[in-house]
Image (tube, grey):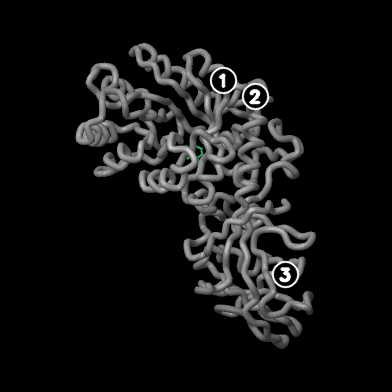
Amino acid sequence: MVRRPCWVEISTRAFEENYKLLAQACRETVNPTLDLLAIVKADAYGHGLSVCAPAAVRAGARWIGVTSIEEGVAARSATIALNPALEILTIGGIFSGQGAEVIRHRLTPVIWEPAHLDELEAAAKAAGADSGTVAVHLELDTGMSRQGAGPTELGALLDRFARRDDSRLRLDGIMTHLYAADERNGEATREQLTRLETMLEQIAARGLAPRRLHVGNSAAVLLGGGSRTALASLLAIAKRFGLQPMARPGLALYGLAPEFDPPLPGDQLPLLRDLHTSLQPVLEWKTKIASVRAIEAGEVVGYNGTFVASEPMRLALLPVGYGDGLKRALSNCGYVLIRGERAPIPGRISMDQTVVDVTDIPEAAVDDEVVLIGRQGGEALSALDHALWAGTIPWEIFTSIAGRVERRAVERTIQG
Ligand SMILES: *Cc1c(COP(=O)(O)O)cnc(C)c1O
């Protein structure tokens, strides 16, 4: 069926190139042993897991990370033909009744509650798994107070591995999440890594020998491995405890660098000095003009007449609204691109429709392609622009793009 024209184009090549670029920069400028786990949670940040998970594998990723067990199952089926041994980390915990799927699809769950171990142990037993064959990664709460075991809960969890030789579970990895990797003074990060080290001592004292340690999001990766960075500490800690180091970038794979505090322009980022020309946007969000009308001075636009025309105007109607994920906060403040020019959004964005001002783009006509995020002619709008207009962050802009917006995989790259 021909659909209402509101779609995103996903450049799988841009995604692959972003992964390769980060992986190569990490190997060459940080440390050859540093591996990357590609974060494709939340439907690959709204870009489509079924498209991005295989792209990550083609680019060389041996690890990907998703939120839930159901995303893990979807990721396995999307990648099994390319690499059946791909390691799929499920970050968001295990809920009662999900253990069987973890075992069946060989997912690697992040655990931190005794109940996670109960659920998995029972499922592994029911599936007839041998002892030590189900790998899990333990998350340590080093200060974010979100998920993970803190120093007081850690002992009881470790007992479950150390005392029970008959356990079917194997402590394969340790992770923690940095909550302020984008703060350049690094104070919070250093405190977190100190706590991590103390907890790793506890783990080693029990005679447990996990293989891997993963820490660090896009911000931590882009700050590189210079002295006193998160990656430098990760490498030192991993070496001390004989662990393989890994970082977990998400946003950068989709072509955006996080905003740093204080700001750090792309051309000064330690890992990728030419960020603007190196990382490429993966997604473009487009629609088409549905109709065009003229209004007189004094007429209003949209719900509650928040915009009043002060002169005659030409308006174009777009079949996209906040029900598609276009932030309502862009009402009376955002722009779209039409014929390579910026057209403002006067009045309130509706659920399914948005009106834009094409008074200064006289050739604008029905069926013209409109760019919400992406490039047209010499102009570009990014998820960061939307985030700044809407008072939020690009992660929320990407993941707000609704399921009803069609995802189309395209081969070509999008010129950043
Ligand atoms: C989302 C997430 C990441 C990736 O974060 P970015 O800032 O998008 O790079 C890494 N680790 C964990 C645990 C996450 O939840």
Pointer 1 residue: 235
In this rendering, position of residue 122 left or right of residue 70: left
Pointer 2 residue: 30
- Name the quadrant containing residue 171: top left
Q: Give the residue at x 56% y 37%.
A: 249
Residue 344 or residue 76, whichever sits in front:
76
Pointer 3 residue: 338
Marks 1/3 in contact by CB < 8 Å: the verdict is no
Across and down, in percent, residue 189 comes to: 55, 28
**Cα–Cα span, label 1 and label 3:** 48 Å
Marks 2/1 in contact by CB < 8 Å: the verdict is yes
Q: Give the residue at x 24% y 44%.
A: 97
Q: Give the residue at x 58% y 44%.
A: 251
Across and down, in percent, residue 134 comes to: 32, 29
In this rendering, position of residue 378 left or right of residue 203: right
Looking at the rendered structure, the kind of residue marked 2 is: Val
